[in-house]
Amino acid sequence: MNIIHSILLGLIQGITEWLPISSEGQSMLFMMGFLGISPEDALSLAIFLHLGTTFAVILKFRSRFVDIVRLRSSYDSQLFKILLISTIATGITAIPLFFLIKAFTHGDAVMLLIGVMLIITGILLGTPGRRASGYKQMEDMNVKEMVFLGLAQGLSILPGISRSGTTITFLLLDRMNQKDALEVSFLISVPAVLGAVTLSLLTSPSQLSLPLNDALLMISTSFIAGYATIDALLRFAERLNFSKFCMILGLLTITFALLPWIL
């Protein structure tokens, strides 16, 4: 991997993170298809790349995180409760799926998985009622809803499943207003990503051998690109329906994965 590759990967992560098209899936497709990186290493690197955009989320919502730590009001306590319970629930689905994917990281199989998951994401984004804004606020969430939100988020460890698309869809279908749904989705992503990166580092020793310069360049690029584009791309994502895009990309990915068996 050279400097250009590191920058491109950072840009892909920084831009696609705010769109409901699975930044993990897009990064893995690029790494496997154009850089010749093995599926296992591509999965680990795709997870690692989220550090940059996670730092962007922390900076964007820094005052909110400070309030959560200080717990000055019942509102802050509710946010802390949402983060804690949803993170635990995320681990329940994400950890077993992570090891399952690692056990079956073969080129064609992973490409097929990404393609199928992108189609599922497309179907999810096309769910009737998803684009309607409800009346509920984050203060109205109960423990059961927090658990199911976390379980849904854990599914996004599967490359091709959009984390933001899944969590925001769940919250909107649960009748939460769009503003709170968006904020909750990004707030709960921080502990989930930090946990996923830690798990990936502990189980993928090869990732620790990544040159420090390459690692810093990828994270810095994804952070800068992510922070610079977050507001514009979120507005863009609200106006467009990415359902068809995900389904078409999923079908193309499946086709390319099956070509060696067909030809």
Image (cartoon, grey):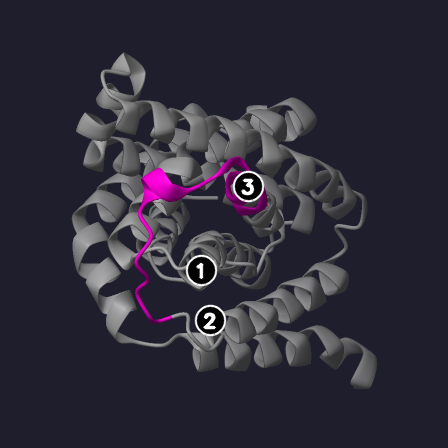
Label number found at residue 150: 3
Cβ atoms at labels 1 and 2 below 8 Å apart: yes
Residue topped by disc 1: 165
Q: Amino acid at mark 2?
A: Leu
Q: Secondary structure at mark 1?
A: helix
149 inside magenta stretch: yes
At 57% from the left edge and 39% from the top edge, which residue is drawn? 147
Closer mark to the observer between disc 3 and disc 1: 3
| Residue 215 percent location from the top left of the image | 42, 31
| Residue 92 percent location from the top left of the image | 68, 35
Q: Residues within 10 Å of mark 2 (few under 14, many from 20)?
A: many
User: Which numbered disc, 1 or 2, marks the residue that appears first in the sequence?
Assistant: 2
Start and end of the magenta stretch?
131-150
In-image side of 173 versus 108 (left or right): left
Label number found at residue 26: none
In-image side of 228 versus 223 (left or right): left
Q: Secondary structure at mark 3?
A: helix
At 57% from the left edge and 61% from the top edge, which residue is drawn? 160
206 inside magenta stretch: no
Residue topped by disc 2: 125
User: Which numbered disc, 3 or 1, marks the residue that appears first in the sequence?
Assistant: 3
At 33% from the left edge and 62% from the top edge, which residue is drawn? 134
Q: Secondary structure at mark 2?
A: helix
Closer mark to the observer between disc 2 and disc 3: 3
Q: Is residue 18 above or below residue 239?
A: above
> Quadrant location of residue 111?
bottom right
Q: Is residue 219 above or below residue 15?
A: above
User: Which numbered disc, 2 or 3, marks the residue that appears first in the sequence?
Assistant: 2
CA gap, disc 1 and disc 2: 7 Å
Q: Amino acid at mark 3?
A: Gly
